[in-house]
């Protein structure tokens, strides 16, 4: 009993605090409006001879009440020459402000500031008096009990009499409201009377067992109904007391075998009644509190672990009512609390999920969840907030379906219900023009999720599963129909991609149910190609299938990357480490062909998608070509890479460069942007491949690579020639792309390649096929310096002939490097005539170069 009183006090205190905040927030605006109205009335009623009056202005710290009193005080009359003698001056007239005063006097508290004296001297004592009356009655009964003056029957009867007397007093206070002029008197008396009646039934049923649990329960329910009915007469606090007492009633009546269907029926009626009362009184928050209390009792009911069918059904129906009907009653017409629809549906679905788990995922439990979805769909036909709760319930149902271990028949029944209620209903809403963004996403996501769950549960092995495929195809038809209907009502790209992804995923799952994994790549490619050729407007679905097929090819690509990763560090991969030809043919080849078809069939406005598809096609073509090419160079033995590594790299670079040049030629002749970018990419890949593998890692000057035994007629010339052509094409394309430094960068690379090729050729003349086998001698070292000078002269002549200053500058740089080498390196290791001869040769060379350079400059 004391606990009940504490709860009631807390609720009343919270309500009073909220009212206090609302009154204080509107005080300033009401006071100013009152001052303005009084001033206008006073100006209209005063004589015209007093134009010098000024409106009272509040001084700092002065209250609006003081201004109002000063404004309404009688003013000294002004004398004027009367037309007839008068013994006394006329009394000043007061403006007719009775209407205004009446408008504010009934509840003047809302227009005045609530200071300490107002709150604790005028407002709280009446409420405290009502509570004190209830507590005093309880203490009076307790004193009589302790003194032995009352038997249990007399005590209970006295409690009933005292509660009824308090309610009669509240009714008298209501009837004589004009004299009391304060509605809180009747509210306090009614609250005390209801609390006493609650205590009386509690004592009679639970403490003294004068009546049975059923009678006590009925009496407490009757008091609750009376409280809700009296709320329309005595005010909102009475409804609050009915809410607290109504939800506390089941806890106050003890029973070893509670009637769960009756209890849930009572709680549902109580929540609906409180919600209706709050809605009629303009207090939608009262219905929200009732919902929280109802769901709190729902948790208590779930904790009792109902095993009887009647108890299970009663609990489920109670939760369905709380999640659907009660919110509609509670906040009907309130837009600010529309989120409560969603919250109620979500809470109901969570508690129903617990109930389903308690009953081991029985069909009866699934039926209750379907009933919740159906109720939310019906009530949400006009209210989007209710449909959002249905979306949450559908998502939770899908999660439960994924964790279930069902039979095929049970799964088909539940999945069909979910498909109809969670996917077909949003499509129907779109058909009549009532759908929102949440509905469209629900229609997009539910069918593929159901298909994925079905495949997860029932797909086994490589054999065809016709029934599973039929179910998945039916879901695909639902997804395609939704895409067609939604496509006529909205055209956002994100929704288009969503529909396309859903249909593509369902098609993929259907193929999984029918075909072995080895045929999956070609099946996806054929399906996407058929869509591109027959239904070009559904190209997003074909692109989604391309993404799925690309994912299907990822394992083979991962094998290819893992085999080539060590090669980046200088450890060549053998052919057996690469993907098998069958894997490439089944997984990569169909994706490459599909990407090429997408690049060809997409229309011009889809330029970005065409370029992306073309890039995928070119990249996969490179992978396919590399795997096929490496079959010619397996490198299974340790010496194979030394003997044929340079040949393998040279041929592969020739293939890449040839393909790139062909694409560039086609792009320039037919103005194809995709071919231009693809050709540039292949040229860049060629040059990068040579730079890393042929120049840095496996350069014959410092790595064991057979170049051939015949001078000049060996692999050095084609290897460096291919790299030079790639550098020239790269510089040209960079310049055509709008970067002026492109040609200069290409020429710098050409100079480096020419110098390294000359040094490599000199080294081959002394060492033979493997350049690192024989150490370099003094004669070869001197010839390297001379060769550097000759190459510099060649740069100078080329720059003069092509009239390109960068080549002449490059020749000077190379010349300076050669001279520095002679003075700092070569001359330091020579003695006698060799040193003299080297300096003489260098001097004559420098003079000759200077003379040639001056003649060339004069000629230009």
Image (spheres, rainbow, N blue to C red):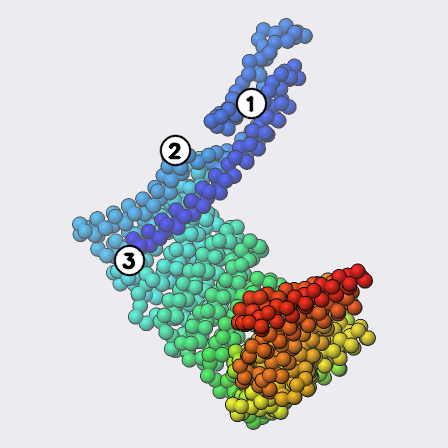
- Distance from disc 1 to disc 2, alpha carbons, whole Å, reads 26 Å
Q: Earlier in the sequence, mark 1 or mark 3?
A: 1
Foreground: disc 1 or disc 2: 1
Residue 56's disc is: 1
Q: Residue at x 75, y 79 (%)?
A: 662
Instruction: Determine whether the residue tagged by mark 3 lies in a helix, strand or loop.
Output: helix
**Residue at which label 2 appears:** 117
Query: Callout 3: 10 Å neighbours few (<14), some, many (20+)?
Result: many
Work out whether residue 268 or residue 199 is closer to the camera in this orientation and state it: 268
Judged from this view, the residue extending furthest toward the bottom is: 463
Q: Earlier in the sequence, mark 3 or mark 2?
A: 2
Query: Callout 1: 10 Å neighbours few (<14), some, many (20+)?
Result: few
Residue 842 horizontal/vertical position (percent) = 64, 68
Residue 32 higher or lower than 189, as above or below: above
Q: Earlier in the sequence, mark 1 or mark 2?
A: 1
**Residue at which label 3 appears:** 203
Q: Quadrant of the C terminus?
A: bottom right
Q: Is residue 307 visible?
A: yes
Residue 127 higher or lower than 215, as above or below: above
Residue 367 as seen in the image, left or right of residue 140: right
Work out whether residue 807 or residue 535 is closer to the camera in this orientation and state it: 807
Residue 773 horizontal/vertical position (percent) = 54, 85
Q: Quadrant of residue 547?
A: bottom right
Q: Quadrant of residue 313?
A: bottom left
Q: Residue at x 51, y 90 (%)?
A: 638
- Tag 3 and tag 2, C-beta contact below 8 Å: no
Residue 74 horizontal/vertical position (percent) = 54, 18
Q: Residue at x 61, y 9 (%)?
A: 79
Foreground: disc 3 or disc 2: 2
């Amino acid at each position: 009993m004391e606990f009940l009183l504490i709860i009631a006090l807390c609720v009343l205190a919270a309500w009073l605090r909220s009212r206090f905040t609302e009154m204080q927030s509107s005080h300033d605006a009401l006071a100013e409006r009152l001052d303005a109205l009084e001033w206008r009335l006073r100006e209209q009623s005063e004589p015209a001879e007093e134009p010098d009056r000024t409106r009272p202005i509040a001084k700092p710290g002065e209250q609006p009440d003081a201004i109002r009193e000063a404004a309404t005080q009688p003013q000294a009359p002004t004398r004027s020459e009367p037309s007839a003698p008068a013994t006394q001056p006329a009394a000043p007239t007061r403006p007719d402000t009775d209407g205004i005063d009446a408008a504010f006097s009934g509840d003047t508290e809302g227009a005045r500031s609530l200071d300490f004296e107002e709150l604790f001297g005028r407002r709280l004592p009446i409420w405290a008096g009502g509570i004190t009356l209830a507590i005093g009655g309880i203490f009076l009964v307790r004193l009589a009990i302790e003194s032995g003056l009352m038997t249990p029957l007399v005590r209970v009867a006295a409690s009933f009499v005292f509660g009824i007397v308090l309610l009669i007093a509240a009714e008298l206070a209501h009837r004589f409201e004009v004299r009391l002029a304060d509605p809180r008197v009747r509210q306090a008396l009614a609250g005390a009377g209801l609390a006493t009646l609650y205590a009386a039934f509690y004592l009679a049923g639970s403490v003294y067992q004068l009546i049975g649990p059923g009678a006590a329960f009925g009496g407490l329910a009757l008091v609750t109904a009376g409280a809700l009915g009296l709320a329309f007469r005595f005010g909102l606090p009475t409804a609050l007391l009915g809410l607290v007492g109504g939800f506390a009633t089941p806890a106050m009546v003890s029973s070893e075998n509670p009637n769960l269907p009756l209890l849930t029926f009572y709680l549902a009626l109580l929540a609906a009644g409180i919600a209706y009362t709050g809605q009629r009184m303009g207090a939608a928050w009262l219905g929200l509190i009732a919902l929280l209390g109802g769901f709190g009792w729902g948790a208590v009911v779930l904790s009792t672990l109902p095993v009887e069918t009647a108890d299970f059904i009663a609990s489920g129906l109670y939760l369905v009512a709380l999640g659907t009907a009660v919110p509609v009653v509670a906040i009907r017409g309130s837009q600010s609390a529309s989120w409560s629809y969603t919250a109620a549906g979500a809470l109901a679905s969570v508690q129903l999920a617990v109930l389903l788990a308690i009953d081991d995922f029985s069909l009866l439990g699934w039926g209750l969840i379907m009933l919740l979805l159906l109720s939310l769909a019906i009530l949400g036909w006009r209210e989007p907030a209710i449909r959002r709760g249905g979306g949450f319930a559908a998502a939770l149902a899908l999660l439960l379906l994924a964790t279930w271990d069902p039979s095929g028949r049970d799964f088909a029944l539940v999945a069909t219900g979910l498909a109809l209620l969670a996917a077909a209903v949003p499509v129907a809403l779109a058909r009549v023009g009532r759908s929102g963004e949440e509905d469209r996403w629900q229609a997009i996501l539910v069918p593929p999720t159901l298909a994925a769950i079905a495949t997860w549960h029932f797909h086994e092995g490589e054999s065809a599963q016709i029934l599973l495929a039929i179910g998945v195809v039916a879901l695909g038809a639902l997804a395609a129909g939704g895409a067609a209907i939604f496509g006529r009502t909205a055209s956002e790209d994100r929704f288009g991609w969503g529909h396309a992804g859903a249909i593509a995923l369902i098609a993929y799952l259907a193929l999984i149910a029918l075909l072995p994994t080895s045929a999956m790549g070609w099946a996806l490619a054929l399906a996407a190609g058929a869509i591109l050729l027959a239904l070009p407007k559904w190209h997003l679905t074909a692109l989604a299938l391309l993404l799925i097929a690309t994912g299907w090819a990822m394992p083979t690509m991962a094998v290819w990357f893992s085999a080539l990763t060590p090669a980046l560090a200088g450890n060549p991969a053998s052919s057996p480490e690469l993907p098998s030809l069958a894997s490439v043919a089944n997984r990569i080849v169909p994706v490459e062909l599909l990407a090429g078809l997408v690049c060809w069939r997409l229309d011009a406005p889809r330029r970005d998608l065409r370029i992306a598809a073309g890039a995928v096609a070119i990249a996969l073509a490179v992978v396919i070509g590399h795997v096929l090419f490496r079959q010619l160079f397996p490198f299974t033995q340790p010496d194979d890479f030394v003997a044929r590594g340079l040949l393998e790299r040279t041929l592969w670079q020739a293939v890449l460069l040839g393909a790139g040049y062909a694409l560039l030629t086609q792009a320039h002749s037919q103005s194809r942007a995709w071919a231009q970018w693809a050709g540039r990419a292949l040229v860049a890949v060629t040059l990068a491949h040579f730079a890393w593998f042929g120049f840095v890692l496996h350069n014959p000057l410092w790595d064991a690579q057979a170049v051939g035994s015949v001078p000049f007629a060996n692999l050095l010339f084609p290897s460096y020639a291919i790299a030079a052509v790639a550098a020239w094409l790269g510089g040209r394309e960079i310049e055509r792309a709008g970067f002026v430094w492109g040609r200069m960068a290409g020429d710098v690379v050409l100079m480096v390649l020419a110098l390294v090729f000359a040094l490599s050729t000199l080294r081959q003349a002394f060492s033979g096929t493997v350049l690192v086998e024989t150490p370099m001698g003094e004669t070869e070292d001197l010839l390297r310096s001379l060769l550097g000078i000759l190459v510099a002269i060649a740069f100078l002549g080329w720059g003069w002939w092509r009239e390109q200053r960068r080549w002449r500058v490059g020749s000077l740089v190379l010349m300076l490097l050669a001279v520095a080498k002679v003075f700092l390196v070569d001359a330091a290791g020579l003695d006698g005539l060799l040193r003299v001869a080297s300096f003489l040769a260098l001097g004559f060379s420098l003079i000759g170069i200077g003379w040639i350079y001056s003649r060339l400059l004069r000629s230009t």
